[in-house]
Image (cartoon, rainbow, N blue to C red):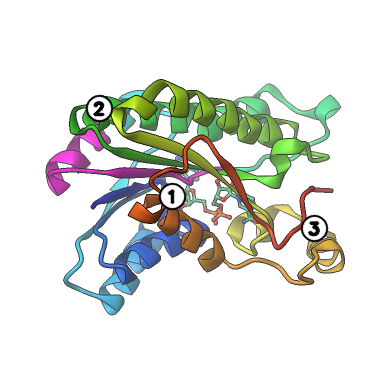
Amino acid sequence: MNVFITGGSRGIGRAIVLKMVKEGIPCAFTFVSNKTKADETIQLAGDIDSSIKVKAYKMDSKDPDQIEKIIEQAITDFENIDAVVNNAAVVKNNAAALMTNEEWDEVISTNLSGPFYVIRSFLMHFISNRFGRIINISSLAQDGCSGQANYAASKSGLIGLTKTLAKEYGSKGITANVVTVGYVPTDMTRHNLAESLHKFWLQHCPLKKVGSAEDIANLVYFLISPESNFINGEVIRVSGGLTYAP
Ligand SMILES: NC(=O)c1ccc[n+]([C@@H]2O[C@H](COP(=O)([O-])OP(=O)(O)OC[C@H]3O[C@@H](n4cnc5c(N)ncnc54)[C@H](OP(=O)(O)O)[C@@H]3O)[C@@H](O)[C@H]2O)c1
């Protein structure tokens, strides 16, 4: 089993890479600009188990041609890829009435078109193997979140995409599922969301705590493991029981 993870340089993507390495699974992962952080992920993976292959690729989710080339390269480098985790994403928050074309386009192209291009680039490979695991990372914002029309649309779009793939390719041994993330303190939330969100979470989450990147990585690992072979087209929340965003 080899896994391809987008956005493994930081946050949740890094935790997914490290979980895979802990479980003995080689990983190809991407970053868009933060080579120092990508190198740090490789270093941390090496500290866990230096015998497990981990390689970073610079790849912009907004560039379909680059995605195709990088994925071809990763399949060559690893000889085979069995699972893909679409984790890379951005936020550009604004009230819908004030949202610029750029804010809308950047979020939709990174968070929704990007995963589609990545999946499309893997599908023929998965079909010829008659095996593939597709995991798309969404957010509680998928059901609507104030100030995040672009992000919410991208994250709910992933659900339609995933459920379609589950139907279209299930017969080829390929499963597709969504992991819906609650709230995890990372660069994304630290830079873009007010402290009030942290407080909201502690107050309203039934578990009275925020999530960790490892909580998400554990479910992703389960979804690529043989124990989840009959799970297809599902949307699974990791949110401590909180079911809505503010
Ligand atoms: N954190 C949360 O509370 C939360 C809640 C709900 C859902 N999520 C979802 O969980 C996933 C991970 O979020 P996170 O909080 O870990 O984010 P993060 O810390 O901001 O990390 C984002 C990752 O995506 C990469 N990336 C950004 N723009 C890219 C682009 N154009 N092309 C390719 N890669 C790009 C970044 O690469 P560089 O390092 O090179 O910039 C980085 O590796 C996302 O899908 C997010 O929507 C997170």
**Residue type at the position of mark 2:** Ile
- Where residue 58 appears, as percent x and y from the top left, is 32, 45
- Where residue 88 appears, as percent x and y from the top left, is 48, 45
Along the horizontal axis of the image, is 161 left or right of 173? right
Q: Residues within 10 Å of mark 2 (few under 14, many from 20)?
A: some
- Reading the chain from its start, which is encountered first: label 1 or label 3? 1
* Residue in view at x 34 percent, y 53 percent: 226
Which residues make up the magenta segment? 69-89
Q: Residue furthest front?
A: 230
Judging by the rendered image, the residue that carries numbered circle 2 is: 127
Q: Residue furthest bottom?
A: 47
The part of the image, by quadrant, that contains residue 14 is: bottom left
Disc 2 + disc 1, Cβ < 8 Å: no
Q: Tag 1, which secondary structure?
A: loop
Along the horizontal axis of the image, is 69 left or right of 207? left
**Residue type at the position of mark 3:** Ala
Q: Residues within 10 Å of mark 1 (few under 14, many from 20)?
A: many
Can residue 9 be seen by looking at this rendering? no
- Where residue 222 appears, as percent x and y from the top left, is 43, 57
- Pick the front one: 38 or 228: 228
- Disc assigned to residue 152: none
Cα gap from disc 1 to disc 3, whole angstroms? 23 Å
Judging by the rendered image, the residue that carries numbered circle 1 is: 7
Judging by the rendered image, the residue that carries numbered circle 3 is: 194
